[in-house]
Image (cartoon, grey):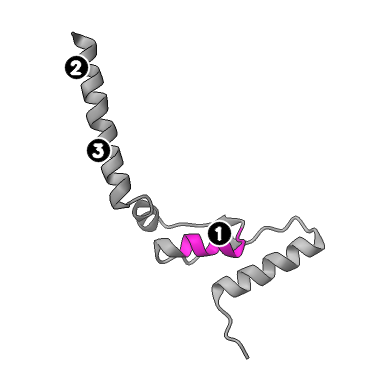
Amino acid sequence: MQADTPQRVTRESRSLLDKTGTETRIIVESIRRPDDVNEAAIAGGHIVTIPYKILTQMPFHKKTEETIAEFDRAWQEFKQAEKK
């Protein structure tokens, strides 16, 4: 017998709901790490409740931080050029 994982239960529940055409929505909670959010969405959860602590961790990525810094530098350069 295969162990039930949150992803498996969500995926199977979503499949059943889709087949029956019900308007019921799956709410996924007990999120403990950023990857849980992706796994819940991939498994078919309609709504994911995300604690603030996890939500603030989600957008962090080294490339994201580098890109934001690049946009900030470009904006400052634009503002300086505009003053001339």
| Amino acid on which the number 3 mark rests in the picture | Ala
* Label whose residue precedes the other's in the sequence (1 or 2): 1
Q: CA distance from mark 1 to mark 2?
A: 43 Å
* Label whose residue precedes the other's in the sequence (1 or 3): 1
Residue numbers of the magenta segment: 36-45
Secondary structure type for disc 1: helix
Location of mark 2 (residue) = 80
Q: Is residue 38 magenta?
A: yes
Principal secondary structure, stretch drawn in magenta: helix
Q: Is residue 22 toward the left or the right of residue 50 in the image?
A: right
Q: Residue at x 18, y 8 (%)?
A: 84
Q: Residue at x 24, y 38 (%)?
A: 69
Q: Residue at x 74, y 64 (%)?
A: 17
Secondary structure type for disc 3: helix
| Amino acid on which the number 2 mark rests in the picture | Gln
Q: Quadrant of the N terminus?
A: bottom right
Residue 28 visible here: no
Location of mark 3 (residue) = 69
